[in-house]
Each structure stands twice: as structure tokens, then as C-alpha cells.
Amino acid sequence: MKRRQFIHKNLFAAGGVMGLSQFPGLLQEAWASDLKSEFKVSIAPWSLTRKPYGENDPDGIHFLDYPLVARELGFEAIEHDNLHYPGDLPNDKHLAKMKQRTEEAGVTNTLILCGALGDIADSRKSRRKKANFNYERWIEAAQFLGCHQVRVVCSDHIDIDWDEKMKLTVEAVSKLADFAQGHSIELLIENHNGYTSNPNWLVEMIQKVNRPNCGILGDFTEWRIEQNPDVLYPDPYKGYEILAPYVKSVGAKSTTFDVLGNELVTDYPRMFEILNKVGYQGYIAVEYFGNDLPRRKGTTMTKELVERIIAKY
């Protein structure tokens, strides 16, 4: 299938995803709209540090100081990112130090954001195998730290057609989800460019995987399907409505605020109402990604905005 056909068929065609009412079993019951939402607040590490370990990031912090800084900003739960740790694979010594630091800071470890580890659905078998090995090691690291989730980036490039990529992704995600289940970890796929930024494609994949520990990390703003020039999913709110029944963690990204502290890129109240309608139970990860404010200030403003909204629920 040509890229243009992919965009035309799957972005703008109505009814491309099986409705929740057509999806039988426990998932439909768990995500029924009469559930009372329970929103909890955490912090994504990219709010404070935007470069991988070892790169110059003058406004960032050392990765071992991150738990204490997060606690000083009022967070009781924190996410991690594999890129902020030394080396491509987890190191027992660094993990032990981080676990000690989080215990000293009195914060809960929730999730490891994993990326740049290869595509477990790569069209080349050798690369799929290597990526799967890398992710398995970080799933083990997440279990050691006491996290309950791992975010996976996969299928974020349109390199083969819809059906081929779907088949490879379902096979790879199913295998990795089974491995994660053995470590008491939920495996989350983020809407993170390419195929995964098409909510129809992503939800179809999650339905086909059909694992209780596999779901979506729903980012408010990651809707870029293609680059150069950018092709975006046309309606992020409609997109989020499609994703919402399968969302197990939320990335509340922010960049710019008005004088009242409202985020100008995303209608936060509208996003929270979408989550509330499906009875979302889980963390809202604050991720300030702007440049107009000092990072700690922008992070605090995002946290305050989230807390103002969830207080209504």
C-alpha cells in the first residue's frame, strides 16, 4: 500500500476501528463509562532532562539526583527513561543506586519509558530479535526498580504497508507482553509517530494482541504520522477518544501557558473529560516540554494545572 493510500484510507475513513461495544470480554467491562475515574500525578523525566546520558544538557540534572528533585517539586511518583541511564542496556550497579535514591526520596517508581532500542516489528528478522532482547532487559530492570509498566516505541516509521506492519507488530508485541507478564509488568505502546500515531491502527493492533497486560500510553500531542513535510492525525481529540478505552498511562505534555496557567496547545479539561468518560484509572505524567520557562517552573505549572482539573473529579 502506498503512503498516500495509507493516509487517505486510514486517517479520514470513518469506522476504521472496531467499536468498544463490538469488543467482547473483560476489557469492555473494565472500561465501562460508569466507572469513577481515579487520576494520580507523576512526572516524566524529560520535564527536567532533555538529553541522553553523557550529552551536554546544562539545564538538566544528574540522573541519580532526579528522584530528589522530583520530590522537592512535590511529586510522589516518578517515571524513568532508559536514555537517561549510562549504556544501552541496564547496569546492575546503576539500578541499585537508583533504587536506593528513590527510596531515600520517598517516591514511587511507576514506569520506564524505553526507546532507541530498535523496532521489535522491524521488517528485518535480525533487528527484531535484537530489539526484543534489548526490551526484555529493560523489563527486568523495571521489575527490579518496582515499576509496574514499560513503554515501548515500535512501528513508528511507515516503511512497509499497513497489513505487513500490523502482522509483524502483533506478533512482536504479543511475545514481549507475555515476557512482561512473567515479570508483573504492563507493556504499553505509545502513540509515538508513524503507524502508532494513527489511533485506528494502534487500537486495531492492541485488540489483536488481546493481552490483559498490554495497552496504550496515550500522549496528548504525539500525532505526527509522517515528517518532511509533517502529516498529522487531523483531530487529536477524536484520536484520543479512540485510544482512551485502552490507555493505561497518560503523558500530559505541555509547552506554553496563558496568564491563568492554562496550556495553550492542548485543551486539558477536554482531554481529562475523555479519560473520565471511560473511567480511566492511573497516572497522569506531567511532561513540560517548553522553552519559555525554566524547566522546574514549567513542570510546576503543568502539575498545578493537572491538579486543578482532577480536583473536579
Image (spheres, helix red, strand yellow):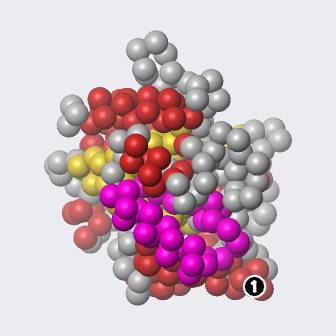
Q: In the displayed structure, would residue 236 be above or below residue 267?
A: below
Q: Foreground residue, 29 or 4?
A: 29
Foreground of the two, 85 or 241: 85
Residue 89 shown in magenta: yes
Q: If the image is split into quadrants, where does the C terminus sit? A: top left
| Relative image position of residue 65 (x, y in whole percent) | 52, 54
Is 132 included in the stretch rendered in magenta? no
Q: Which residue is mark 1?
A: 125
Per the image, label 1 sits on a secondary structure element best described as helix
Residue at x-position 81% and y-position 38%: 229
- Asked if residue 38 lies left or right of residue 23, the reply is left
In the rendered image, the residue lying farthest to the top is 259
Answer with left or right where residue 212 lies relative to residue 166.
left
Residue at 58%, 58% in the rendered image = 63
Q: Give the answer, above or below, for where 258 lies relative to 79.
A: above
- The answer to which quarter of the image holds residue 245 is bottom left
| 310 up-or-down from 40: above or below | above
Q: Nearer the viewer, residue 268 or 163?
A: 268
- Note whether residue 36 is visible: yes
Q: Nearer the viewer, residue 135 or 68?
A: 68
The image shows residue 306 at horizontal and vertical percentages of 36, 35
In the drawing, does residue 3 fall left or right of residue 179? Answer: right
Picture residue at 27% right of the left edge, 43% below the top: 277
Q: Position of residue 255 (x, y in %)?
A: 57, 30
Spot occupied by residue 189 in the image (x, y as percentages of width and height)? 52, 63
Q: Bounds of the magenta span?
A: 78-106
Q: Label 1 sits on what residue type?
A: Lys
Give the answer, above or below, for where 180 lies relative to 221.
Answer: below
**What's the residue at 51%, 35% (across, down)?**
296
